Structures are given as structure tokens and as C-alpha cells.
């Protein structure tokens, strides 16, 4: 039986590129992840995130973590989850030896019944505003992967 052998410089080049593909893909995906985190941070602004003092909005800058093929952004303000998820009615008690007082109160009190707060789901709003940009970053990454694998 006859044996045939086909050699192609393009095939050899493609085989070498395929061996390098994990590094090529990782580089472009990592860039897309970093750009996407920046996109989310850019959209964590007044009008999307509740604003009283601005601390909640600014705390997103402290909550950025980027690792190998991983990225996370979150607010670091301790009360962020209470704003986002809301709170049930609860009692607020004064610290030992103190009292609670606010503008309009006639005198300090030892405790108050707080009616709770409605959730203010700001995280989905941030994502919605950033989604188009995030999609663009990953589309660009895939285009660059394809380009790098075929050159």
C-alpha cells in the first residue's frame, strides 16, 4: 500500500501557534478582564449608586481585586450590603453611657425602633450601564486571539 506524506510550512506554523495558544489566549483575556473591571468602576457613580456622602461610591476603588483570569470589584463600605439588600425593622440602642439624639429630637433616648429600609439594588444598575463596554472588551480579546493565532 502506498504511503503519502504532505508537508506544509503553514501547517507547521499553525502547530507552533497552537502550542502557544494558552499563553496567547490568557494574555488577551486578562486584558479584557482588567478593562471590564475598569468599565464597572467607571459606572459606579452618583445617580447609579446611592449618594449621601459619596463614601459608598468611592469605596468601589478600594474593592478592586485582579488575579490570573479573575477580576472583582465591590464596595468596601461596611454598610453597602444594608443599602443594597435593605434592612428589616430593628432596634437601635445607644452605646453604654450615651444616648441617641438627632436633629428635631426633643431629648436623647436610649433606643429607637427603626422601621427598616427598602433595598436599593445598585449593583445590577452598574452592570447594566457597563455591559456594552464589557462585551466590547471581550469581543476585542477574541479578535486579537484569532489574529495572533493566524499570523
Image (cartoon, rainbow, N blue to C red):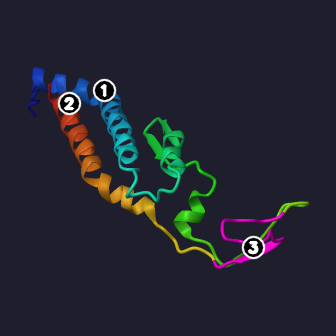
Q: Quadrant of residue 48?
A: bottom left
Q: Quadrant of residue 147?
A: top left
Residue on which disc 1 sits: 20
Secondary structure beneath disc 2? helix
Q: Quadrant of residue 25?
A: top left
In this view, the residue farthest toward the top is: 9
**Marks 1 and 3, how far apart at CA:** 73 Å
- Locate residue 18, reporting x and y percent: 26, 31
Tell which tag, 1 or 3, sits nearer the viewer.
3
Residue on which disc 3 sits: 106
- Locate residue 65, reporting x and y percent: 51, 39
Q: Which residues are magenta?
A: 99-115
Residue on which disc 2 sits: 149
Indicate which disc residue 118 carries: none
Secondary structure beneath disc 3? loop
- Closest to the observer, 142 or 16: 142
Q: Residue at x 38, y 48 (%)?
A: 40
Callout 1–callout 3 Cβ contact below 8 Å: no
Residue 53 lies in magenta, yes or no? no
**Sequence order check, earlier mark of 1 and 3:** 1
Q: Residue at x 30, y 56 (%)?
A: 129
Q: Is residue 7 visible?
A: no
- Locate residue 37, reporting x and y percent: 39, 43
Residue 18 located left or right of residue 150? right
**Marks 2 and 3, how far apart at CA:** 74 Å
**Sequence order check, earlier mark of 2 and 3:** 3
Task: Count neighbours of disc 3 (C-alpha within 10 A) and say few if under 14, some if 14 to 19, many if 20 or more.
Answer: few
Residue 45 located left or right of residue 99? left
**Sequence order check, earlier mark of 2 and 1:** 1
Amino acid at each position: 500500500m502506498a504511503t503519502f506524506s504532505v508537508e506544509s510550512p503553514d501547517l507547521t506554523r499553525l502547530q507552533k501557534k497552537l502550542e502557544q495558544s494558552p499563553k496567547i489566549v490568557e494574555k488577551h483575556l486578562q486584558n479584557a478582564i482588567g478593562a471590564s473591571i475598569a468599565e464597572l468602576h467607571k459606572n459606579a457613580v452618583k445617580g447609579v449608586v446611592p449618594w449621601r456622602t459619596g463614601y459608598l461610591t468611592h469605596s468601589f476603588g478600594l474593592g478592586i481585586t485582579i488575579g490570573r483570569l479573575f477580576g472583582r470589584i465591590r464596595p468596601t463600605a461596611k454598610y453597602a450590603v444594608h443599602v443594597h439588600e435593605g434592612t428589616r425593622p430593628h432596634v437601635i440602642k445607644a452605646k453604654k453611657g450615651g444616648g441617641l439624639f438627632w436633629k428635631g429630637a426633643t431629648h436623647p433616648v436610649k433606643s429607637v425602633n427603626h422601621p427598616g429600609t427598602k433595598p436599593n439594588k445598585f449593583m445590577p444598575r452598574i452592570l447594566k450601564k457597563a455591559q456594552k463596554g464589557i462585551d466590547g472588551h471581550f469581543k476585542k480579546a477574541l479578535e486579537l486571539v484569532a489574529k495572533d493565532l493566524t499570523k
